[in-house]
Amino acid sequence: MSSQTDANKVLVRRFFSAIESGDLSAFDEIVAEDYDDHLPGQTRGRSVLRTYFTTLRTAFPDLQLPIHDMVAEGDRVAVFNSVTGTHRGEFPALGLQATGRRIDAMAFQLYRIENDRMAEHWEVADFATLLRQLTG
């Protein structure tokens, strides 16, 4: 494995760690300013990403994203992870007030790294399970 591929994996781990710890200021060093998130409804930009995770961490203050597997090749890093937490705040994306319920869903992420920063993201997540756990 190349040292650049290893560095890309370290970068993605730093990203996940920043989200879990709530240190979203770390995005300035980790995420490209014009970050392109291919989730439906998302627009470009590091600031958009920071707002998204601020909202998510407000809804799930104990949010954790344990990584189960990570594979890297070239400028791509694929991650298979869980999304866990307790719904303690408003979740505007679904129009839900805090339910106190736990979530535990799986997600597959693909990141493209450019100039030692995260530049693009694609995701397939088990949103059906997450919704069922919240509305139950």
Image (cartoon, rainbow, N blue to C red):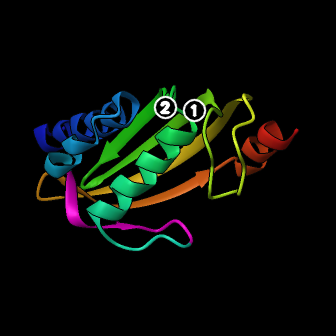
The reply to whether discs 1 and 2 touch (Cβ–Cβ < 8 Å) is yes
Residue displayed at 58% across by 43% down: 107
Q: Is residue 102 above or below residue 5?
A: above
122, 22: nearer the viewer = 22
Q: Residue type at mark 1?
A: Ser
C-alpha separation, residue under disc 1 versus residue under disc 2 = 5 Å
Residue displayed at 51% across by 25% down: 62
Q: Which residue is mark 2?
A: 65
Q: Which corner quadrant of the image does residue 86 belong to?
A: top right
Residue displayed at 30% across by 48% down: 73
**Quarter of the image where the N terminus is located:** top left
Q: Which residues are magenta?
A: 31-40
Whether residue 8 can be seen here: no
Q: Is residue 36 magenta?
A: yes
x and y percent of residue 42 in the render?
A: 47, 70
Q: Which corner quadrant of the image does residue 6 belong to?
A: top left
13, 103: nearer the viewer = 103
Element assignment for label 1: strand
x and y percent of residue 105 in the render?
A: 67, 36
Q: Is residue 118 above or below residue 120?
A: above
Q: Which residue is mark 1?
A: 82
